[in-house]
């Protein structure tokens, strides 16, 4: 295996090596080095990733779990996207002090605002632990394998954590052909330093989302704090700004077509080895279901958010992420069809099978057929699984009630274990606290009624949980009437103890199975959970196990078939490097998209009073005076955004775009519509990364924020 793994890095026809395609593993990036230099890189390998000296990887963090951020000053100043800081900014905003609407700038450390649930993960090192994992799990299958895998992971992670000094993960690469250990330092005292108003940070809103040309100032700034020894510490006023091993200097020289561009970041998930049937299932079943359910959820949320500014602040962050992926799935479906990705995959599968037959590779010759057939066995439940996640679990009350299932199981026992019960009631307290912060009961009720009805209507009768017949239709009317679901919802919310903190506390003091049994929200949730667990969970797990095995073998086979190609693993929320160039593109016949946008385009899109395209008057004044200072280009324009050929996905949001000299030239924040199938099949012609230009960002910090203190910390190069 080890030998194959080394050649993994040098191999593959399915993913023919191109400068732009590939999310490369940082400590193995040396294999790509010559190509990077050819494209314009001027740094050494050690400047990119090193465990012996400060390198670029030390300036890049995983931000808050799902995004990327980078350090741009010796004092721990961090920049990420506005849409990554959005939840924290909304959480710090009130109707009176609305930082989301008005922006925020700290003019001293003392003015910086501690943000909830924001973390910065610094990567210390990566180690290959494939041999150790393989040795421990050799010849095991199914449940035994899963159990042993958990054990060995935990063992390696515990050992490397050195008594919790480090946060550690063992992660799977190439679908389990390789295992790497990642060792991090996790900083949890992270404070808001600055953000433009939402009108700029989210300029264009959902209309422009996932599209080029774009004019969004998608950035926000935080600062990482450490204890006196520069180590992670819980929030304390004695903490001091973190001193990074490495921070990025900032170039305001500007970019031009063909310039080298490199991205370090934390891409979340891709599925580039998916087979044709999996893609058909996404196109026909899964994606349309998600879009349909989200259409409804978003309309309900919007209605309540528009009526009440406080509700708006509670829901705006989750609204943004639900709508972000609502549009994502619309775009993915459209592009998978337009680019004939299914046919392309079928052709690749056929080539693979032909190769296996010709070379008498018995391990591979039936593989893609079996892999594709597997989807056939899963198809009857695919919609149920999607609705279970997207409909049943959409209302906060349903999620809270569903989380009680393990407690219920414990209380059901003859003599429940007091410690286990305590652990579950502690979880309940935590879940309640997390949910209630962003809960508006009238909104949640509307979601509950609508999702309950849609689940009933769209999922086959035979797959319904019993609650529909036993309670809903028996007591509240016919399945065809919307009123039935509304009346039932009113009853559930009026009678559950889960949303009443006094009653909930009383239950936590004395949890009994009787109380759970008589709670209507629990009865509802348990009916869905039980139905899922009794009838579908095992099938889904079996599907996933088999799929994993097929995928692992498929990748192994592909590397044997393409011994001399460069090879990279699917994204898995670990640090990757991608390199490419600044480049325009042609979205359709006779249409050409330039590689950059300007402030003039911002003004072209300006719609006073509009939710997505309004602008602050200060910006319009600056535009009228063309007061762009040192940030104007040679034509006197202010460049706002630009595009590159880098291979990124969700999770890369907030990633630095770095030029050949290791300078920060902007921040990545999106992908383009014409390549929305990119997570499944990289499209060489259309795929672009959308970035906000460093000059637009610094211009806003200086001219709108007047935060000279921040500019002074930075190393700005013209
Ligand atoms: N599509 C971007 C991403 O996934 C998020 C952009 C946020 N803006 C928005 N209008 N939702 O990284």
Image (tube, helix red, strand yellow):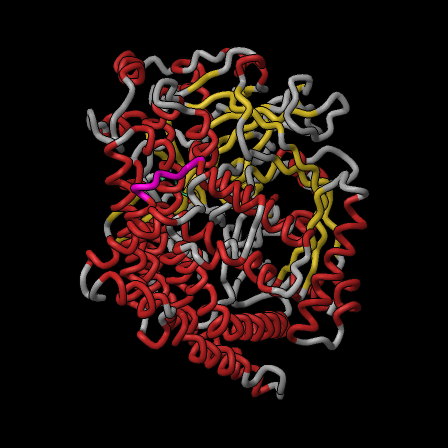
Residue shown at 39% from the left, 21% from the top: 103
Residue 644 visible somewhere in the drawing: yes
Residue shown at 44% from the left, 69% from the top: 531
Q: In this view, does 374 lie above or below 219?
A: below
- Quarter of the image for the N terminus: give it: bottom right
Please state the horizontal and vertical placement of residue 453, each as a whole percent of the image.
27, 60
Q: Nearer the viewer, residue 458 or 23?
A: 458
Q: Is residue 706 above or below residue 128?
A: above
Residue shown at 43% from the left, 70% from the top: 278
Quarter of the displayed picture in which ligand 1 can be seen: top left
Q: Which of 499 and 310 is in front in this view?
A: 499
Please state the horizontal and vertical placement of residue 678, each as a whole percent of the image.
43, 56
Residue shown at 52% from the left, 42% from the top: 506
Seen in the image, is 325 located left or right of residue 121?
left
Magenta region: 437-443
Q: Is residue 618 above or below residue 290?
A: above
Residue 152 in magenta stretch = no
Seen in the image, is 283 located left or right of residue 715?
left
Q: Quadrant of residue 384?
A: bottom left
Seen in the image, is 602 located left or right of residue 383?
left
Please state the horizontal and vertical placement of residue 574, each as a whole percent of the image.
61, 49
């Amino acid at each position: 295996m080890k030998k194959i793994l080394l050649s993994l890095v040098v191999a593959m026809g399915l993913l023919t090596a191109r400068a732009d395609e590939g999310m490369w593993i940082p400590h193995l990036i040396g294999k790509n080095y010559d190509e990077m230099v050819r494209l314009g890189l001027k740094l050494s390998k050690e400047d990119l990733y090193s465990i012996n000296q400060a390198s670029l990887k030390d300036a890049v963090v995983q931000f808050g779990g799902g995004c990327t951020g980078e350090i741009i000053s010796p004092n721990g100043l961090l920049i990420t996207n506005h849409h990554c800081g959005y939840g924290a900014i909304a959480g710090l905003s009130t109707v009176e002090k609305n930082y989301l609407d008005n922006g925020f700038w700290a003019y001293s450390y003392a003015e910086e605002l501690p943000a909830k649930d924001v973390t910065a993960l610094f990567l210390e090192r990566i180690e290959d632990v494939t041999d150790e994992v393989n040795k421990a799990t050799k010849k095991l299958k199914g449940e035994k394998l899963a159990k042993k895998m958990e054990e060995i992971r935990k063992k390696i992670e515990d050992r490397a954590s050195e008594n919790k000094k480090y946060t550690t993960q063992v992660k799977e690469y190439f679908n389990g052909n390789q295992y790497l250990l990642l060792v991090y330092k996790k900083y949890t005292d992270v404070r808001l330093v600055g953000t433009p108003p939402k009108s700029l940070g989210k300029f264009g809103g959902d209309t422009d989302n996932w599209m080029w040309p774009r004019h969004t100032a998608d950035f926000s700034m935080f600062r990482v704090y450490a204890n006196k020894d520069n180590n992670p510490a819980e929030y304390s006023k004695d903490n001091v700004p973190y001193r990074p091993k490495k921070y990025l200097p900032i170039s305001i020289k500007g970019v031009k077509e063909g310039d080298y561009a490199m991205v370090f970041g934390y891409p979340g998930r891709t599925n580039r080895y998916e087979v044709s049937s999996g893609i058909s299932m996404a196109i026909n079943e899964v994606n349309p279901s998600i879009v349909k359910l989200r259409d409804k959820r978003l309309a309900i949320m919007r209605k309540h958010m528009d009526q009440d500014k406080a509700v708006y602040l509670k829901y705006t962050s989750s609204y943004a992420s639900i709508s972000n992926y609502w549009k994502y799935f619309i775009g993915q479906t459209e592009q998978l069809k337009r680019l004939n990705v299914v046919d392309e995959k079928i052709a690749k599968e056929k080539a693979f099978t032909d190769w296996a037959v010709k070379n008498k590779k018995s391990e591979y010759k039936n593989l893609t057929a079996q892999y594709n057939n597997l989807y056939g066995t899963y198809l009857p439940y695919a919609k149920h699984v999607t609705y279970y996640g997207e409909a049943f679990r959409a209302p906060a009350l349903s999620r809270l009630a569903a989380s009680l299932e393990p407690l219920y199981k414990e209380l059901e026992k003859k003599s429940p274990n007091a410690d286990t019960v305590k652990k579950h009631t502690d979880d309940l307290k935590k879940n309640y606290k997390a949910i209630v912060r962003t809960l508006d009961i009238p909104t949640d009720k509307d979601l509950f009624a609508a999702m309950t009805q849609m689940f009933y209507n769209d999922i086959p009768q035979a797959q319904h949980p019993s609650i529909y017949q036993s309670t809903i239709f028996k007591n509240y009317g016919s399945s065809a009437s919307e009123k039935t679901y509304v009346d039932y919802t009113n009853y559930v919310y009026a009678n559950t103890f889960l949303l009443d903190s006094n009653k909930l506390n009383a239950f936590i003091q004395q949890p009994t199975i009787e109380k759970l049994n008589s709670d209507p929200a629990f009865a509802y949730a348990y009916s869905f959970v039980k139905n899922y667990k009794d009838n579908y969970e095992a099938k889904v797990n079996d599907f996933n196990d088999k799929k994993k095995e097929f995928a692992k073998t498929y990748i192994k086979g592909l590397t044997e078939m393409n011994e001399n190609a460069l090879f990279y693993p699917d994204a898995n929320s670990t640090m990757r490097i991608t390199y490419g160039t600044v480049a325009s593109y042609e979205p359709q016949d006779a249409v050409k998209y330039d590689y950059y946008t300007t402030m003039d385009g911002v003004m072209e899109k300006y719609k006073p009073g509009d939710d997505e395209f309004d602008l602050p008057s200060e910006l319009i004044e600056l535009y009228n005076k063309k007061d762009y200072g040192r940030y104007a280009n040679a034509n006197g324009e202010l460049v706002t955004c630009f595009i590159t050929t880098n291979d990124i996905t969700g999770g890369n949001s907030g990633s630095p775009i770095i030029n050949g000299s290791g300078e920060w030239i902007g921040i990545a924040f999106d992908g383009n519509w014409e390549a929305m199938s990119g997570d499944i099949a990289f499209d060489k012609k259309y795929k672009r990364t959308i970035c906000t230009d460093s000059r637009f960002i610094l211009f806003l910090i200086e001219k709108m924020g007047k935060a000279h203190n921040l500019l002074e910390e930075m190393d700005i190069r013209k």
